[in-house]
Image: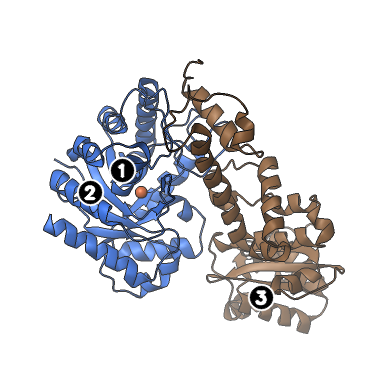
Chain colours: A brown, B blue
Amino acid sequence: MQRFPDLRGVQSLFWRLVAAPEGVAAAVGSEDLSYLIRPDARLGAVERLDIYADMYFYRLRDCLAEDFPKLAARVGAAHFHNLVTDYLLAHPPRHFSLRELGRALPDFTGSHALERSFPALADLARLEWARVEVFDDADAAPLCWQRLLEGGAAAPESFAATLIPSARLLRLDASVLALWRGDPAEPGERIGVRVWRKGFAVHHRSLATDEERCLRELAAGGVTLARLGELVGNAPRLAALLDLWARDGLIAESEARDTPDR
Amino acid sequence: MNSVPDLGHGVGLRREHFGRVLEGPTRVDWFEVISENFMGKGGRPLHVLERVRRDYPVALHGVSLSIGSTDPLDRDYLDRLRELADRVEPAWVSDHLCWTGVGGHNAHDLLPLPYTEEALEHVVARVEAVQEHLGRRIALENVSTYLHFAGSTLPEWEFLAEVAHRADCGILLDVNNVYVSAVNHGFDPEKYLAAVPADRVWQVHLAGHTDCGSHLLDTHSRRVCDEVWGLYRFATRRIGAVASLIEWDEEIPDWDTLEAESLRARAVRQEA
Ligand SMILES: [Fe+2]
């Protein structure tokens, strides 16, 4: 009989068997594990390892289902189970936090066969992941309309703003917004979408072209009101956008910086 | 003599109860939170934790320390834990006597150790390194296990006591885990509890489990069972008044049901 391995050996072997995509029994094959695990009358070594294998898989699957509820609902339980199996094989969890588990799932979904049966699936996952990310991103004090009037109107060349940390700008298939609500939709053009947290609530909404242009520059930080005026091209429209951003708590005051194309 | 305060009877703070707890008042004495859930940069979890901390003692309970792994300690994790502890000023910081991954992987599960002299020395050295890094002592919790390694040379209770003694750390005694492992491996849970060094126990966990027929599974999905209440009474007579905490993580009940479990722990301890 084989000797009991050292701690490193025990852990490596345990891991290989418990995370085996083909299942513990297939991974063990005909090997006698009694040198490793003490069997008893109730359960053998494979069955005992199976308890851990199940806990490993189902905990991770449930975590992904919680972070990607719309994706899970769109493909249904069986497809989602298979997607997770394939994903964990390609991207076994490495981070100490379960919060990071789904980081690579949107891109992985894009390369998965399911994307052909469910168009825009990866984009739906991108939207869901952005919502996970902003949920506990850093807090910021958003710019209110009054401060914009006082500071901004007085010094448009030096008063600068930035996108808040808990906001993301995405480009997604337009059908994703309907799919997220659970409505049927055909794939369409790609549009800009912003995801952000206001207070503790996470929101998303589509972007007009000029708004997207402004927000992409604001994301780099330190954009003056004068520069925003150039980007938008007319004052009433800029005032409307600033009003919207102030109400959504989307931008914060920042130091001005040199804009790239001036 | 025990070196930490008796915080009374608490519950694990879960997001389903954030609103109710902030609304207050509650009849629980303290809260335990899962450290990793509050390592974000902002947002609701940290806000809630800081509000709760104003009114209650809080302990940080981690699941990713992986003290028994043969991978190097995760310095990034330890930095984040230290940062969180500096922010929250918890009554104490705890994690589990187990490993959670190897080869850079993380199972996000509490995996069993062989109870050998090699594992003992390995864990003790790492607890010392962690305590050094955090600038505080930690408590380690016994976990539920579903297999027994053929190479184990010590019973679990001796292994736990030896770790605590050699590394000079605390013990978070999970009475339900003792019961689950006792049934799964066929040992006497009272023998386990009798062997735990009373002066090292900082805290007790109480939770529910699921009977799967061939074994018990530590699910935290229901009320504490009568056998575990009996063992809690037995443990209390031995170790005296230490903080108790109800864990409930699956099929989370309404606040009143959870609070009632904590009040029951208070009653059982008073009667003991
Ligand atoms: Fe526990």
Task: Tell me which numbered mark, 1 or 2, is placed earlier along the sequence.
Answer: 1
Quadrant (top left/top right/bottom left/bottom right) for the C terminus of chain B:
bottom left
Q: What's the mark number on residue B178?
A: 1
Visible residue check, residue A24: yes
Tell me whether marks 3 and 1 sit on the same chain. no
Amino acid tagged 1: Val
Residue at (72, 81) in percent of width and height: A239
Q: What's the mark number on residue B231?
A: 2
| Residue B264: image location, x then y, percent | 23, 63
| Residue B53: image location, x then y, percent | 33, 61
The residue pinned by badge 3 equals A245
Visible residue check, residue A262: no
| Residue B217: image location, x then y, percent | 42, 48
Amino acid tagged 2: Leu
Q: CA distance from mark 1 to mark 2?
A: 9 Å
Residue at (27, 39) in percent of width and height: B170
Q: CA distance from mark 2 to mark 3?
A: 58 Å
* Badge 1 element: helix
